[in-house]
Amino acid sequence: LSQKHDVTVYEKNDRFGGHSNTVMVNTSLGPTPVDTGFIVFNDATYPNLIALFEHLGVRTKESDMSFGVSLRGGETEYSSVDTSAFLCGGRNLMSPRFWSMTWDLLRFYRNAPLQLLATRDTMMSLGEYLNAHRYGAAFQRDHLLPQAAAIWSASMGDIHHYPACAFVRFFENHGLLKLKGRPKWRTVEGGSLSYVEKLTAPYAANARLRSGAVSVRRDASGARVRDARGRVDRFDHVVIATHADAALAMLEDASAQERQLLGAFRYARNRAVLHTDTAFMPRRPPLWASWNYVGDNPEGGCVVSYWMNKLQGIQSEEQIFLTLNPRTEPRADSILYENKYDHPVFDGAAIRAQEQLWSLQGVRNTWFCGAHFGSGFHEDGLQAGLAVAEHLGGVRRPWTVENESGRIHIGTPQRVKAIAA
C-alpha cells in the first residue's frame, strides 16, 4: 500500500511480528535465536510466504516435523521418528489399544477424504463423523485429536467440534492423510525475526509502536482512529489486521453484519513457556520428536512440547523446549521466556462466517485481514493481507504464484462493486 498511499501503522506491542516472536537465548553457541510462535512452513501450501521470503532474500533451512505422543504418565508412548520409536522399542507390539489405533488410522486415511469431501453436510463436526463411523477411543484420543490439537494449539474438545469436511480438506492439502510423500518443512535461519526486520524496514521508523488502535469510528468521508495514548487521527481508509474479536472490539459503530461475522470467531489463549526442563518431554528419550503431545490441561488448552533444537537445527549443548499450557511449572532455573498467544477456534459458526467475511471489505472504507480468513496460519493471513492491499491500493504483489488466494474465501469487495457500477 505504501507504494501509492500514505500509510500509518499502529502496533500495540513494542515490537513488530505478533506470533512471529524470536527470543535470544544464551547457549553454548552464544546468543541463539529461538522462535516461540511461528516456527515452520512447508513447500506445498505456503506459496506466497515462500515468494515473500525469496523477494526479501530471507534464508531458510530444512526442519524436522516428527510427531510424538506421551499419555498416562508415559504408559502410552509412540512417535514418528522411526519405526522403533513408533513401536516404542517393541513395547507397542503387545498392546491391543495400539493396534486398534493403527488400524483406525489407516482406515481414516483411506476413507475420510472419499466420505467427506463429496458430502453436502459441510457442518458435520469431526466428533460426529468419528462416532458415526465407529472410530475407536484409541485412535481418537491417542492420535487424531492430539495431532490436530498440536497443529491448531487447541484442546481436544475444541477439535471435536471442528467441521469434519474442512478438517479433512486441510489434512489432505497438507499431506497428512498419507504415510509417504508429505510436504517438506522449513524454518527461517536466524528465527522469524530475520524476515520481520526486512519486511518492516521501509516503514519501521514511522510506525506507532506501543500505540495500538483502540477505537475506530466511520463516517461518509473516512474513519477516525484513536490509539492507546489517546491520540485521534482521521484517515480515508482503515485496514484492521487483527484477530476477529479484536477487530470487532475496536469498532465503535459496528454494523449488524460486522457483529455477526466477526463475532462468530472464538479464540483460545495458550501460555507458551520456553525452558530446558526435560520433564516435559516423553519419558523415553529415543521417542523425542519435534512436536510432542503430552495431554490436555484441565484449565484449558493442549499440552504440547516443541523440541526447538530439532525444529530449528540448533546445535547447542542445551536442549531447549517450548511447552504450551504446562500442567505444572518447569523448574524455575530452567525457564527462559514465556508469553501468551491467542489462536482461533474453528467450529461450525466460524467456518460459516468465513464464507461471508469478504463481503465486509470496503464497506464504510473499512477493510479486514488476518489468519482467521483461512485455517489460522501464516499463509492464510498473508493471502488475506495481500488481497486487501491489491483491492484497496491498486498495486499487484511482486510475484506470481498458482492459486494465490486458494486458502481463503475471496470475492469482489463492496467498494469495488460500487465503483464498477
Image: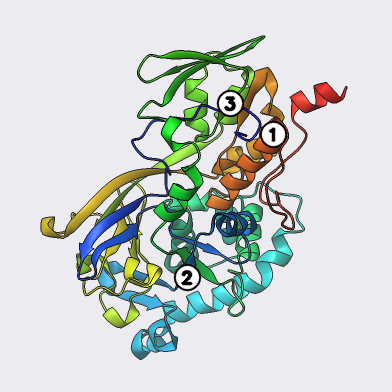
Q: CA distance from mark 1 to mark 2?
A: 35 Å
Q: Position of residue 205 (x, y in %)?
A: 42, 34
Instruction: List the residue tagged with mark 3.
Output: 6
**109, above or below 272, in the image:** below
Residue type, label 1 = Trp
Disc 3 secondary structure class: loop
Viewer-proximal residue, 212 or 198? 198
Labelled disc at residue 358: 1
Labelled disc at residue 259: none
Q: Nearer the viewer, mark 2 or mark 3?
A: 3
The reply to whether the C-beta atoms of the residues labelled 2 and 3 are less than 8 Å apart is: no
Local packing at callout 1 (Cα closer than 10 Å; few below 14, some 14-19, many 20+) is many
Tell me how the rendering is colored: rainbow
**240, above or below 188, in the image:** above
Residue at image x 49%, y 64%? 59
Mark 1 or mark 2: whose residue is earlier in sequence: 2
Q: Is residue 275 visible?
A: no
Residue at image x 69%, y 53%? 399
Q: Position of residue 309 (x, y in %)?
A: 32, 70
Instruction: List the residue tagged with mark 2.
Output: 61
Disc 1 secondary structure class: helix
Residue type, label 2 = Lys
Quadrant in the rendering for residue 177: bottom right
Q: Quadrant of the N terminus?
A: top right
Local packing at callout 3 (Cα closer than 10 Å; few below 14, some 14-19, many 20+) is few
Residue at image x 32%, y 60%? 33
Q: CA distance from mark 2 to mark 3?
A: 36 Å
